[in-house]
Amino acid sequence: MRFLPVVLMVVSAGVTQAGGSPAATAPPSAARATPADTSHLLAAAPQPDGETPAAASTAPPPRPFRAAYSASYNGMAIATVRTFKAEGEGYLLATRASNFLGSIGEEEVLTFADDGSVLSGSYSYQRAIFGNKRKELTTFDRDTGRVTNTYKKRTVEIPLQDALYAPLGYQLQLRRDLMAGHREFHYRVVSRGKIRDYRYTIKGAETLDTPLGKIATLVLERERDTDERQTFLWLAKSYDYLPVKLVHSEDGDTHTMLIESYTSTSP
């Protein structure tokens, strides 16, 4: 079930949850990503216009939404749901992925700074697969300037630095940075007792056929130290760069995720 955690990365990100819908059939471009597979995207890649983008998106917080995705892992269907809603004085971003083997759930409470950037507050992760359970809890205390992370019964404290995120918060920040016109994407994320670096590169643009109709997307690739693992995201501009597709290749296998439905309500 290694694919479940990868799917949860989406989202960004909108980047995986349960439901019984069948796995979507991946279009030809979803085959194992290689330079040949993505070359058709490069000509459409947006080019910087010479202007310096804003430090962060000053757009208002996203409206509450629910996005459902379908995916497959070695022929097994995986359904995912991501939700975003106001809660208390902040917002709750949550993702749940599951099938008959188990489930993974993530929740993050967050707020927004005056400049529109994401401020992670608390994060929880729970996994139950084949009867094995695992939890992770992270809190960002801005009064004491400390981040506390508990994983596998081990707790560590990390000094709270600028632009430090939890695993769901950085995905939302990525969307807002795209809305602000950024072309470089580097995020420092507290995960499993460490600060981890996530970097993405724009590969191009592509119009996808989805259950929602044709959607114009921007394609991003996660930068890695090895070519043995590749992850591509398709983000829809008309949905504030919500992830609508993911392709992950590892150990010779390719797995895909595609959006099935999307609903939005007023705040």
Image (tube, rainbow, N blue to C red):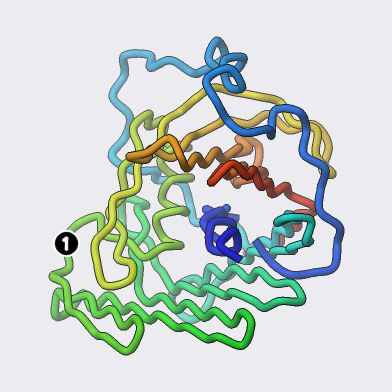
Left or right: residue 161 compared with residue 85: left
Residue carrying label 1: 161
Left or right: residue 103 compared with residue 55: right
Quarter that holds the C terminus: bottom right
Residue occupying the point 26% across, 72% down? 193
Residue occupying the point 67% across, 78% down? 102
Q: Position of residue 37 (x, y in %)?
A: 61, 22
Left or right: residue 10 compared with residue 51: right
Kind of residue indicated by mark 1:
Gln
> Quarter of the image holding residue 223?
top left
Task: Kindly state the secondary structure of the residue where label 1 is placed.
Answer: loop
Q: In this view, does 248 lie above or below 156?
A: above
Q: Residues within 10 Å of mark 1 (few under 14, many from 20)?
A: few
> Quarter of the image holding residue 129?
bottom right
Quarter that holds the N terminus: bottom right
Q: Is residue 69 above or below residue 144?
A: above
- Residue at the limit of the structure toward the top, as seen here: 43
Residue occupying the point 60% across, 37% down? 234
Residue occupying the point 28% across, 57% down? 196
Residue 55 visible here: yes
Left or right: residue 148 compared with residue 211: left
Q: Position of residue 260 (x, y in %)?
A: 79, 52
Q: Position of residue 89 (x, y in %)?
A: 43, 77
Q: Nearer the viewer, residue 91 or 99?
A: 99
Q: Where is residue 189 in the image (x, y as percent from the top left)?
A: 31, 59
